[in-house]
Image (tube, grey):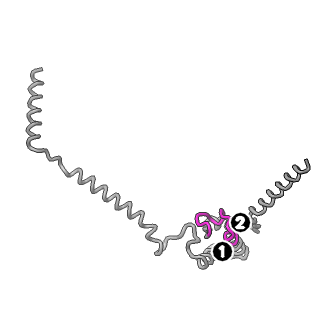
Amino acid sequence: MMEMIRIVVLALASLSALSILASDYSYTFTTPQREMRYQSLMEELRCLVCQNQSLADSNAELAQDLRKKVYDMITTGNDDDQIMDFLTDRYGKFILYDPKLNYENAPLWLLPILMICIGVYVISRLAKQGERSEAVIPQSAQDDADALVKHLEERSKQL
């Protein structure tokens, strides 16, 4: 019985230790606006380790360090542009989850629009080409059709 109690206590202690490791540090802000800015920035910044997660969603050690750095910069009075400029200068534009349109990434933004326009143009040209082309019927088939029409007209007169 005592052995069973020891096992249960050990299991609970292990689980509580794991929950401490998994918990993220929560930061306290002086105003709700600063907290909202922090949350917004966490969603706009990409974790450089995970690459498909925002800083808010990532559990990587670098993400924790970046969250702390952003918190420190907000509490010292830096505005969002200063924080973004600092992080992009240090880590590159890849840290931005939604990069702004500029001359470097303009093809990535404009190429899909260009491809859609080309597709619409090609489809409209093919549709117009189909309307213009008339069905060419060989003369023998035309003669057969005329004979059939005459035959049907004669039969309809007989009825």
User: Viewer-proximal residue, 144 or 70?
Assistant: 144
Say whether residue 25 is left or right of residue 50: right
The residue carrying mark 2 is: 35
* Principal secondary structure, stretch drawn in magenta: loop
The single residue placed furthest to the right in the displayed view is 2
The residues colored magenta run 49-65
Q: Is residue 18 above or below residue 45?
A: above
Q: Is residue 97 shown left or right of residue 60?
A: left
* Residue 87 position by quadrant: bottom right
Q: Circle 1 sits in a helix, a strand or a loop, which is it?
A: loop
Q: Give the residue type at disc 1.
A: Asp
Q: Is residue 11 magenta?
A: no
Residue 126 % position (x, y): 27, 55
Amino acid type of the residue that numbered disc 2 sits on in the rendered structure: Glu
Front residue of this view, candidates 79 and 115: 115
Q: Which mark is residue 79?
A: 1
As helix, strand or loop, the secondary structure at mark 2 comes to helix
| Residue displayed at 35% across by 59% down | 119
> In whole angstroms, how far apart are the C-alphas of marks 2 and 1?
13 Å
Q: Identify the residue at horizontal 38%, vertical 62% (top origin).
A: 115
